[in-house]
Image: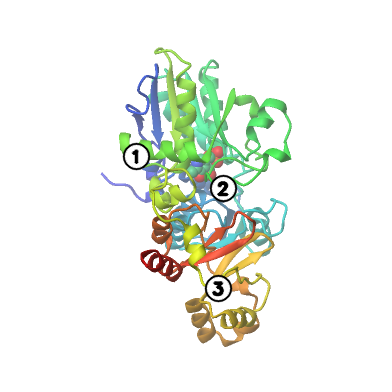
């Protein structure tokens, strides 16, 4: 038996009992493991539904282009559907997304535009605004708009909800899911509550997002909206898919608790899941502790852990965030002290300055990497090897703005971060990290600065 194409494999994901992280918790807790979808996330379901409905409505025709603002997983689903059906794909992705997710989209043939995370949604540079503009400008473009497209929650009403009902033989009492576009939670909740109105639906939110406050007070509190790290859940806008009347309770989970729980799921349950799966299970356990053995909790696990290898599954990254205890030894503070005077402090360039300015600064200070800083925001990096590459391929680049050629922003660490962690973070592509100084401002550390400090320590 075979399938005619990959799209037939979307949905019908398995449900697996959690056995170790649930010790001492009265009810059965089941994970609906969405990484069994062909694009390794729950978003394959909505990608297929939104595209099929656009085709039916004549919004997407052969040779058309799909443009979407996506945090990675929806892009993966859309890119997969587009590859099978022969559409072109362009995605805008905020720059906090993991590099692995962006590379995966490109592998499937999609064009990816990386946009700044820390700008409000109405800013013309935000990933929502850029996607909207591209969709208007490109002829034959279709903008699925997963936030407001109600086919998102319908996909879950038609597939995820019925699957959960059948897999639990109608015994489910509590459903727990992360809230991003809210398509998953609202679609599933509507189906389950139609079958049994007593089923409780619990949404999982992050600190820095608006959902919990909105649910409790009907208000959006701008003070509670700030940058956070967990990918895929939490919002600074109210998605069109949201129907708060379907949600009984919302629990916020910290970036750290989510990351540690995801690692436990991998280590003790063999479930190598994504960061927001940690948030969802952390919240599910909080709910389950208040329940009885007669209850049955289903928690939706949206994606796979492989996309977070550079973050929550990387000990050095976890330690640099303060999520894991650092190992003892020399810290960056000693490296800063050992730096020769003339190279202390930070030379930088702003994104709109011409490349020739960057060359001049690097020559003047005899440095081989230059951070690109806009106000207090670190937006990218220029390395000597990147400059050489650009200037050989494109001599006219000298007059072009730095932002056109800069590479990913370097990681930032604290003076208290141990040197062994920082040395593991340095690579050929990213040969420096920035240090956020206690007195304000930044400094930069390279491998040769670390070497210098190690040599001095032995003298
Ligand atoms: C990893 C991850 N978790 C959770 C969610 C939330 O699902 P929904 O957008 O249906 O609310 C998303 C959505 O982007 C996601 O990518």
What's the distance in space between the residues labelled 1 and 2, CA to CA?
A: 41 Å
Considering depth in this image, is 437 or 63 the residue closer to the camera? 437
- The quadrant the C terminus occupies is bottom left
What's the distance in space between the residues labelled 3 and 1, CA to CA?
A: 43 Å
- The quadrant the N terminus occupies is top left
The residue that disc 3 covers is 343
| In this view, 399 is above or below 65 | below
On the image, the x and y values in percent for residue 329 come to 39, 53
Task: Give the SS element for disc 2.
Answer: helix
What's the distance in space between the residues labelled 2 and 3, CA to CA?
A: 62 Å
| In this view, 428 is above or below 56 | below
Dot 2: within a 10 Å radius of its alpha carbon, few (fewer than 14), some, or many (20 or more) residues? few
**Residue 56 shows which numbered tag?**
2
* Label 2 or label 3, whichever comes before in sequence order: 2
Q: What is the count of numbered marks?
A: 3
**Residue 438 shows which numbered tag?**
none
* Label 3 or label 1, whichever comes before in sequence order: 1
Identify the residue at image location x=66%, y=70%.
350
Dot 1: within a 10 Å radius of its alpha carbon, few (fewer than 14), some, or many (20 or more) residues? some
Camera-nearest label, 2 or 3: 3
**Residue 266 shows which numbered tag?**
1
Considering depth in this image, is 108 or 402 the residue closer to the camera? 402
């Amino acid at each position: 038996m075979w399938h005619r194409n990959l799209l037939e494999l979307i949905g019908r994901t398995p449900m697996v009992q959690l056995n170790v992280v649930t010790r001492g918790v009265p009810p059965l807790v089941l994970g609906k493991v969405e990484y069994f979808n062909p694009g390794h996330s729950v978003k394959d379901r909505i990608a297929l539904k939104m595209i099929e409905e656009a085709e039916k409505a004549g919004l997407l025709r052969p040779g058309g282009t799909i443009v979407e603002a996506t945090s990675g997983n929806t892009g993966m689903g859309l890119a997969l559907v587009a590859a099978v059906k022969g559409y072109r794909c362009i995605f805008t992705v905020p720059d906090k997304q993991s590099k692995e997710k962006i590379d995966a989209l490109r592998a499937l043939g999609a064009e990816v535009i990386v946009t700044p995370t820390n700008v409000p949604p109405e800013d013309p540079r935000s990933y929502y605004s850029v996607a909207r503009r591209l969709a208007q400008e490109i002829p034959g473009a279709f903008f699925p708009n997963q936030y407001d497209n109600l086919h998102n929650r319908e996909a879950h009403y038609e597939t995820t909800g019925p699957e959960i009902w059948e897999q639990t033989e109608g015994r489910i009492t509590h459903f727990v899911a992360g809230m991003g576009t809210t398509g998953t939670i609202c679609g599933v909740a509507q189906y389950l509550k139609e079958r049994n109105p007593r089923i409780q639906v619990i949404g999982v939110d992050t600190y820095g997002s608006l959902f919990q406050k909105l649910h409790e007070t009907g208000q959006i509190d701008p003070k509670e909206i700030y940058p956070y790290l967990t990918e895929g859940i939490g919002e600074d806008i109210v998605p069109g898919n949201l129907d708060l009347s379907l949600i009984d309770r919302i629990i916020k989970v910290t970036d750290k608790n989510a990351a540690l729980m995801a690692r436990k799921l991998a280590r003790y349950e063999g479930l190598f899941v994504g960061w927001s799966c940690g948030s969802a299970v952390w919240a599910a356990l909080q709910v389950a502790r208040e329940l009885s053995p007669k209850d049955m909790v289903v928690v939706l696990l949206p994606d796979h852990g492989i996309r977070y290898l550079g973050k929550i599954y990387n000990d050095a990254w976890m330690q640099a965030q303060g999520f894991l205890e650092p190992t003892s030894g020399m810290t960056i503070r000693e490296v800063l002290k050992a730096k020769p005077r003339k190279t202390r402090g930070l030379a930088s360039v702003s994104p709109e300055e011409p490349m020739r300015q960057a060359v001049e600064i690097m020559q003047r200070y005899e440095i081989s990497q230059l951070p690109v800083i806009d106000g207090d925001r670190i937006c990218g990096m220029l390395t000597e090897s990147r400059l050489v590459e650009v200037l050989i391929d494109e001599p006219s680049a000298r007059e072009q703005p730095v932002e056109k050629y800069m590479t990913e922003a370097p990681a930032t660490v604290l003076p208290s971060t141990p040197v062994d962690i920082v040395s593991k973070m340095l690579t050929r592509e990213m040969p420096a990290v920035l240090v956020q100084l206690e007195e304000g401002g930044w400094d930069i550390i390279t491998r040769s600065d670390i070497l210098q400090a190690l040599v001095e320590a032995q003298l």
